Image (cartoon, helix red, strand yellow):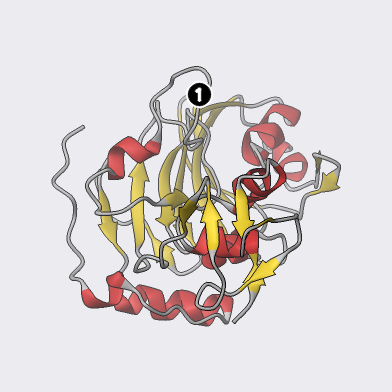
Amino acid sequence: MEERLQKLLSRCGIASRRQAEAMIAAGRVRVNGQVAALGASADLERDEILLDGKPLAAPPEHIYLMLHKPRGYVTTLSDEKGRRNVSELVADCGCRVYPVGRLDMDSEGLLLMTNDGALAHRLMHPSGGVTKRYRVTVTGYRADAKRQLQTPIEIDGRWTSPAQVREIWQRGEKTGLEFLLHDGRNRQIRRLCEAAGLTVTRLIRVQEGPLLLGELPPGKWRLLTPTELNALERELRQPFSNSQAVKSSCKISSKKL
């Protein structure tokens, strides 16, 4: 079956779709002896597809895992500043996986990682719309700040959906808030808090769609269970196939930080 080349490269675990587009634009991809153009399609079973002169391998078995991202790690796998990235924490998972979405360096919590480019695209697309739940500790909270926190803001030229916010605890100068976001744009919660005059001291994502972080320790990862994958399929209305997670037990990695 023919697919757009950037989608095919992503499905084969080579790179994200955006990175694949850059590879195609740079003339690194050939189909049946011809330099491929952006927007071109090919069939992996029928066509000869070369990347940097080497045949494209068949797509790897899909893997879906949950990482408890700790502070101090970036979700950009190629960082010009040389900072630690989340790929170091999942290096023992058996194949190369990519983060779905992002958490900034100072944020913690649930990060889905996979080599299934179609799933990653579906979850990150604005129409994907899975709800994400965050627990946020702030200072400077006032009763009238809630309205400001729920007011849409403009990020990268688009307005966010209204956040749902509730106060869950208060201890001295610190207040615990729960945020529900339907889009989860770049640093959205931190920008909302800044606009409301609040200082964020901790931000942790505890849920994405039907997936719960639970008791997974910081810096550890585990495969998604068949039950979780089924729930995610229902949420996204998209089936996953060829999944290692379905065949594997839900085992927390023993990798040390």
When asked about the image quadrant of residue 236, the answer is bottom right
15 or 171, which is in the foreground? 15
Pinpoint residue 164: horizontal percent, then vertical percent. Answer: 66, 55
Look at the picture and state if 138 lies above or below 30. above
Q: Residue furthest top?
A: 81
When asked about the image quadrant of residue 121, the answer is bottom right
* Secondary structure category for the residue under label 1: loop
**Amino acid type for the residue under numbered disc 1:** Glu
Q: Residue furthest front?
A: 33
107 or 200, which is in the foreground? 107
**Residue at the (51%, 35%) spot, across then down:** 76
**Residue at the (19%, 55%) spot, across then down:** 252
Whether residue 130 can be seen here = no
Tag 1 residue: 173
Q: Residue furthest left?
A: 254
**Quadrant placement of the N terminus:** bottom right
**Residue at the (37%, 67%) spot, across then down:** 62
Look at the picture and state if 57 lies above or below 91. below
Alpha-carbon neighbours of circle 1 within 10 Å: few (<14), some, or many (≥20)?
few
Report the side of 248 relative to 57 (left or right).
left
38 or 218, which is in the foreground? 38
Pinpoint residue 70: horizontal percent, then vertical percent. Answer: 35, 35
Pinpoint residue 228: horizontal percent, then vertical percent. Answer: 37, 73
Count how many numbered circles sit on residues in the image: 1
Report the side of 116 relative to 128 (left or right).
left
Look at the picture and state if 203 lies above or below 185. above
